């Protein structure tokens, strides 16, 4: 087998200038999305967001500008993420002209420009304030009308597909208590604005805890009850014509409309007071200064990381452009929904729309519908966040860490209640407050022990706590944030390690005997599963590398013993009589389509470029059972981690070429295993592309470990120890490299 030869670069700060490629490779502006015909309906919408609030925007055939408004923490009484509503803007006399129509997403400025006739509409979600702003300019004086639309007009029972979208709350048994959707509240006002909100007047939270024998936690405060979220819509020279409509006082050449969003727990009146206060404070800021600060945020976002690929061959150039576009657009979508009060929802983020115009399966639902509902699956949720390390998007990782840290006390209580020992475990499928869904846990508890789930796919699937621990440790390695290490890593990871240390007995050999156990969702009966063994070893090794001031001698001793107590990586002999990694020492009851054995490659990095026994991992990769390349399947990432350039390239080209054809926006992937836009699909390809360019372990960075010779690339990526790595690969050679600050990492050249 041909070995990849890696040599250490001696002068890390040297720059080999290559002006020809810098002139040749395209810029961000070349990947803006522009449509020259209207989107017609929500399937033809274009996304925009500021990290917390977002909009799906389209223009209908009559020229009306229409968009759904969403927010990352608009959780209803069942823990289902709702839209805030729908906005319609009509211009009179109509300036719509199909021949001159244009709708353009300007990525570099985080805004959308729509033109028709002599009218120009600019729409942007302020990166620094909770408002979406629409600016309408025309050479002709126009009358602008604004309408707010909601489909939650009365208390109605959730039935059929719509009830399936509220996943995990109650059984699909007609004898069970039915679920009802609470109506929105449109407030009467004299403020010349539209004010509408949804308040949770009931909550499933307390019942959910009691079902899971965690009633003692109900004293901590219900995160759903009285949660109120909605919008206040107002603008310059707009007056009310009804509680749900506004109009300009007189025709004007300029109109400004602001949609202000807010979520808080409290009364409707206190929510109204707070949202009006926000409106007042934002209105005092000069609009031009706000927009300049907004554009500056996006400039900084794009400047901190980028990947641009080109090729000399025409066919390869088309592939390179497709991959570059997919990477840019998925990172953009992550930014649109990644800075809110809740983590990114894998099954649509904040960009789900109605399915009224979707044909076939799952048609006819409102915009609140999403398959798999409101819970977070760790297998799915993690994937956007792994990509944020090398793109330097550390601010977007904070909501994920916060959700799990907030749930830590509850998970410690669950561990004590169910298993009578210390530590904490996290379910694979979790409500944002930290519990199983009702149906996954099991509503009928007859003859079932506390903690034993009726859903066998997740019954013993707790390795997500280990993977999140590793992500936290990598975050620290990249940021050197000592406060994060002290206040998050130590309290969180310590509890995870304590759980894994105390939960299982030792076998006759003195090693931990992981049984009962499972190997991911796929092998539902297992002994000594690979993900737990590889994950524990990696996390403990990283914890022992933390500065002495963070860990005590007692902890160091306990964790060192934990490594010694781990069984060996399980192996098996395949049909070719080759030794390969096994999913577990023993395994059966196959139900899903994962490759647990390759968790030793990613995420746990036991094997990979520059590491021992890579040939063992390579044989395992090529012998894998599940070779799918969509949704959360991570074969492309593992190919890159093993230095398999052609395999990784083929899969990312396929991934970034495959979006939901029901939609117009080219980065609305899915639905795959989940829902559109599928945040796993694009994020897997992002992760694979990054690891084709760069791989890290501690302070060692391998450069271009899986890069195809036929592609040229210019990149800026973040590395460990607060470094930025800029490089240019052209005509089969690395022609420019710069690491700043210098001498912070050991850079290893692999091409």
Image (cartoon, helix red, strand yellow):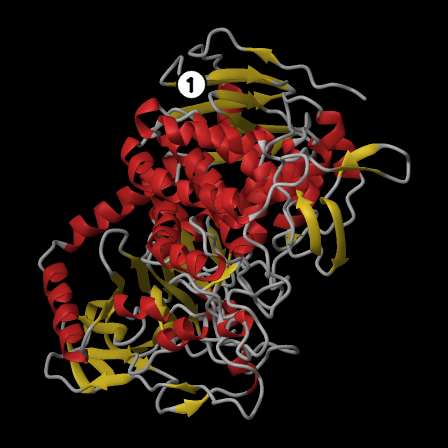
Residue extending farthest front: 508
Q: Could you tell me if residue 471 is visible in this image?
A: yes
Quarter of the figure that contains the N terminus: top right
In the image shown, does 147 or 626 lie closer to the viewer? 626
From the viewer's perspective, is residue 138 above or below residue 301?
A: below
Horizontal side of 272 relative to 410 (left or right) equals left
- In the depicted structure, whether residue 544 falls above or below residue 566: above
Residue 176 located left or right of residue 239: right
Q: Nearer the viewer, residue 42 or 395?
A: 395
Q: Is residue 31 visible?
A: no
- SS type, badge 1: strand
| Residue at the top extreme of this rendering | 10
Residue 729: quarter of image: top right
- Expressed as whole percent of the image width and height from the top left, the position of residue 626 reads 75, 50
Disc 1 designates what residue?
Answer: 739
Q: Nearer the viewer, residue 86 or 621?
A: 621
Q: Residue 502 in the image: state x and y as whole percent.
A: 50, 45
**Residue visible at 40% across and 62% down?**
432
Return the x and y of residue 367 as percentages of the image width and height: 46, 75
x, y (%) of residue 231? 25, 72
Classed neighbour count for the residue bearing mark 1: other residues with Cα under 10 Å, few (<14), some (14–19), many (≥20): many
Q: Quarter of the image holding residue 662?
A: bottom right
Q: Residue at x 60, y 35 (%)?
A: 566
């Amino acid at each position: 087998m041909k070995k990849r030869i890696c040599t250490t670069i001696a002068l890390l700060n040297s720059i080999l200038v290559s002006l020809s490629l810098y002139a040749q490779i395209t810029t961000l502006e070349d990947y803006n999305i522009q449509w020259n015909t209207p989107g017609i309906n929500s399937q033809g919408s274009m996304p925009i967001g500021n990290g917390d609030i977002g909009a799906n925007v389209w223009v209908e055939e009559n020229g009306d500008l229409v968009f759904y408004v969403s927010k990352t923490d608009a959780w209803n009484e069942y823990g289902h993420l709702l839209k805030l509503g729908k906005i319609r803007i009509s211009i009179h006399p109509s300036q719509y002209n199909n021949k001159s129509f244009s709708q353009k997403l300007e990525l570099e400025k985080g805004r959308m420009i729509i033109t028709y006739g002599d009218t120009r509409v600019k729409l942007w979600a302020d990166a620094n304030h909770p408002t979406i702003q629409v600016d309408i300019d025309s050479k002709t004086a126009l009358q602008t009308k604004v309408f707010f639309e909601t489909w939650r007009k009365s208390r109605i029972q959730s039935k059929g597909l719509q009830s399936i979208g509220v996943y995990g709350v109650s059984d699909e048994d007609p004898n069970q208590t039915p679920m009802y959707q609470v109506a929105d509240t449109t407030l009467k006002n004299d403020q010349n604005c539209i004010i509408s909100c949804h308040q949770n007047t009931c909550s499933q939270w307390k019942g959910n805890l009691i079902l899971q024998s965690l009633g003692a936690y109900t004293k901590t405060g219900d995160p759903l009850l009285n949660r109120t979220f909605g919008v206040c819509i107002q603008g310059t020279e707009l007056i009310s014509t009804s509680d749900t409509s506004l109009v300009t006082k007189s025709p004007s050449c300029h109109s400004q409309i602001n949609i202000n969003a807010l979520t808080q727990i409290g009364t409707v009146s206190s929510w109204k007071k707070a949202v009006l206060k926000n409106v007042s404070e934002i209105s005092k800021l000069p609009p031009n200064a706000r927009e300049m600060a907004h554009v500056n945020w996006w400039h900084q976002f794009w400047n901190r990381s980028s990947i641009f690929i080109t090729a000399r061959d025409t066919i390869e150039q088309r592939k390179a452009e497709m991959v570059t576009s997919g990477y840019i657009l998925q990172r953009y979508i992550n930014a649109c929904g990644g800075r809110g009060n809740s983590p990114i929802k894998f099954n649509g983020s904040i960009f789900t729309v109605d399915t009224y115009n979707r044909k076939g399966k799952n048609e006819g639902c409102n915009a609140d519908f999403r398959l798999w509902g409101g819970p977070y699956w760790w297998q799915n949720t993690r994937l956007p966040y792994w990509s944020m390390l090398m793109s330097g998007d550390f601010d977007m990782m904070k909501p994920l860490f916060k959700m799990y840290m907030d749930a830590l006390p509850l998970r410690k209580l669950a561990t004590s209640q169910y298993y009578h020992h210390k530590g904490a475990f996290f379910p694979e499928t979790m409500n944002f407050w930290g519990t199983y869904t009702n149906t996954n846990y099991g509503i009928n508890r007859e003859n079932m022990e506390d903690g034993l789930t009726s859903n066998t796919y997740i019954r013993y699937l707790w390795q997500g706590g280990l993977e999140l621990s590793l992500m936290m440790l990598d975050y620290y390695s990249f940021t050197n944030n000592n406060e994060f290490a002290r206040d998050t890593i130590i309290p969180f990871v310590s509890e995870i390690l304590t759980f894994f240390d105390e939960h299982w007995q030792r076998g006759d050999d003195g090693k931990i005997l992981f049984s009962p156990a499972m190997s991911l969702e796929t092998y539902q009966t297992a002994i000594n599963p690979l993900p737990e063994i590889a994950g524990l070893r990696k996390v403990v090794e990283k914890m022992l590398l933390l500065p002495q001031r963070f860990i005590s001698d007692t902890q160091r001793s306990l964790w060192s013993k934990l490594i010694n107590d781990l069984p060996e990586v399980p192996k098996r002999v395949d049909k070719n009589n080759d030794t390969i990694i096994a999913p577990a020492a023993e395994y059966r009851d196959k139900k899903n389509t994962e490759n647990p054995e390759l968790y030793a490659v990613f995420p746990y990095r036991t094997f990979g470029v520059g590491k021992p026994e890579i040939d063992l991992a390579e044989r395992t990769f090529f012998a894998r059972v599940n070779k799918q390349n969509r949704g959360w399947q991570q074969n492309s990432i593992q190919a890159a981690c093993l230095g398999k350039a052609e395999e990784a390239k083929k899969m990312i080209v396929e991934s970034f070429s495959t979006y939901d054809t029901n939609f117009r926006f080219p980065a609305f992937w899915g639905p795959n295993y989940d829902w559109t836009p599928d945040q796993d699909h694009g994020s897997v390809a992002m992760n694979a592309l990054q690891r084709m360019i760069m791989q890290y372990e501690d302070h060692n960075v391998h450069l271009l470990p899986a890069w195809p010779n036929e592609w040229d690339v210019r990149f800026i990526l973040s590395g460990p120890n607060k470094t930025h790595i800029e490089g240019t690969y052209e005509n089969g050679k690395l022609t420019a490299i710069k690491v700043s600050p210098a001498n912070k990492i050991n850079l290893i050249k692999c091409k």
